[in-house]
Image (cartoon, rainbow, N blue to C red):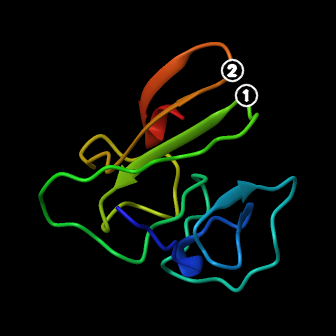
């Protein structure tokens, strides 16, 4: 699937390319306006397009990075706090590596 990233949802340490098709983790937080759509604890950014069903795949280039993660999230995923309470759903899932092992994670395990 072609994905255009939504800058209004990007964590302040994530920098989007001008065409909004790639993202990099920066050394420090950017000074961005507060936005209820913005992730401020998990390093996440959503795509502008959503999917309600079906099968989708993404081709991802990670370059020479030792650590990376890519995943999917529900539009309703919590964006302002890291750890959900005991009755809250985990709505972010990803796969990635820390450079030593590959893992499948939820937002609270990253």
The residue shown at (34%, 61%) is 1
**With 27 as the anchor, is 79 left or right in this view?**
left
From this view, report whether residue 93 is shown above or below residue 105.
below
Q: Secondary structure at mark 2?
A: loop
Give the percent coordinates (x, y) of residue 6: 52, 77
Element class at badge 1: loop
Examine the rendered structure and indicate whether residue 75 appears above or below residue 31.
Answer: above
Which of 88 and 43 lies nearest the eye of the viewer?
Answer: 43
* Residue 98 in the image, given as x and y percentages of width and height: 65, 24
| First reached walking from the N terminus: tag 1 or tag 2 | 1
Circles 1 and 2: CB distance less than 8 Å? yes
Q: Residues within 10 Å of mark 1 (few under 14, many from 20)?
A: few
Left or right of 80 on screen, residue 27 = right
Which residue is drawn at the image coordinates 72% and 56% (left, top)? 24
Q: CA distance from mark 1 to mark 2?
A: 4 Å
The image's mark for residue 99 is 2
Quarter assignment of residue 51: bottom left
| Residue 83 % position (x, y) | 47, 45
**Residue nearer the viewer, 7 or 80:** 7
Left or right of 61 on screen, residue 28: right
User: In the rendered picture of this protein, how many numbered marks are placed on residues?
Assistant: 2
Residue at left offset 59%, top offset 78%? 7
Q: Which mark is residue 66?
A: 1
Q: Quadrant of the C terminus?
A: top right
Q: Residues within 10 Å of mark 2 (few under 14, many from 20)?
A: few
């Amino acid at each position: 699937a072609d994905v255009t990233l939504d800058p209004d949802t990007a964590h302040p340490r994530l920098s989007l390319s001008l065409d909004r098709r790639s993202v990099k983790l920066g050394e420090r937080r950017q000074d961005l306006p507060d936005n209820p759509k913005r992730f401020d604890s998990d390093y996440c950014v959503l795509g502008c397009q959503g999917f309600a069903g079906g099968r989708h795949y993404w081709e991802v280039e990670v370059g020479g990075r030792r650590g990376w993660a890519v995943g999917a999230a529900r539009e309703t995923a919590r964006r302002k706090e890291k750890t959900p309470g005991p009755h809250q759903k985990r709505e972010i899932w990803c796969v990635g590596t820390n450079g030593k092992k590959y893992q499948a994670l939820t937002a609270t395990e990253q």
